[in-house]
Image: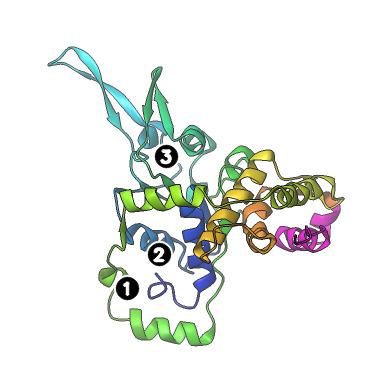
Amino acid sequence: MNAVIEGKPDVVRTAITVLLAEGHILVEDVPGVGKTMLAKALARSIDASVRRVQFTPDLLPSDITGVSIYNQDQHEFEFRPGAVFANVVIGDEINRASPKAQSALLECMEEAQVTVDGRTYELPRPFIIMATQNPVEMEGTYPLPEAQRDRFMARLSMGYPTAAAEVAMLDHHGASSPLEGLRPVADAAGIARLIAAVRTVHASTAVRQYAVDIATATRTSSLVRLGASPRATLHLLRAGRAHAALHGRDHVLPDDIQTIAPVVLAHRLLLSSEAQLARRDPVDIVSEIVRHTRVPAAR
């Protein structure tokens, strides 16, 4: 993936961390910086089922979840699965769809299942949604509701590449698509085994308390109107376990929680009017909270 996404090793590592932590990723940035390329690169790296949904204003919920169609030959309704029935779902420009279409993802993101006409259908495992979106200020966008933003484990921002990385991109990607040479490095069963291994990474009582203390601090900060939810705390610990596993450890350190906290918590916060007037960045606020939260002492 680093050969496809030039100069963004931290972004690639975070995407893999969220995959192993059984989360979903929201990639938000201005057009043209490689959001969709990141999602497609991760999908190409896994030998599993992949579906892409181009979110548009006329997209219907049934296009995402599926629909029951009457079969005249068998005289019964049969279910036609929608785009979410895949291991990796790429939701391109998710905030260009109406809130009604966006809400179709709520159940499948949280429970890995879809309910249509009173019947529940399980989604394949592993299951990850990688959604891209342009900033809300862009034309033709609908802001994601808080309930849906909270279901994304992490929000990534690509940012502009450095001058050297952009020159390398022109050299390597100017003649052909970098995705053409990308080959899978794992299959769905292998990813499922890695996810199961990540679940066994030990998190001590002190580290779990540390994650709760950070989440609690976001709820009591004068800069924040709506802080991190209990779901966010759970996501923070899961991502911490995956971060530790990627660094070859069988236990979570406070450093893991500190590193992953800004991308896991920042997009969930609603800032106070004072913080908005001061143009404070949620990522900076989370980083400041992490710095002021007492780190558990080593034993």
Judging by the rendered image, the residue that carries numbered circle 2 is 37
Please, is residue 203 above or below residue 290 in the view?
above
Q: Split into 4 quadrants, where in the image is the N terminus?
A: bottom left
- Specify few, some or many for label 2: CA neighbours under 10 Å numbering under 14, 14-19, or 20 or more: some
Q: Amino acid at mark 1?
A: Pro
Depth-wise, is mark 3 or mark 2 nearer the camera? 2
Residue type of the residue flagged with mark 3: Asp
Residue 130 is marked as none
Mark 3, residue position: 58
Q: Does 80 appear above or below 11?
A: above
Q: Name the spot of residue 195 as percent of width and height, x first.
A: 44, 50
Which sits earlier in the primary sequence, circle 3 or circle 2? 2
> Start and end of the magenta stretch?
274-299
**Do the CB atoms of the residues marked 3 and 2 lie less than 8 Å apart?**
no
Residue visible at 32% across and 58% down?
A: 186
Contact (Cβ within 8 Å) of mark 1 with mark 2: yes
**First-in-chain label (3 vs 1):** 3
> Can you identify the residue that label 1 sits on?
178
Residue type beneath disc 2: Met
Q: Is residue 28 visible?
A: no
In the image, 233 versus 29, the foreground residue is: 233
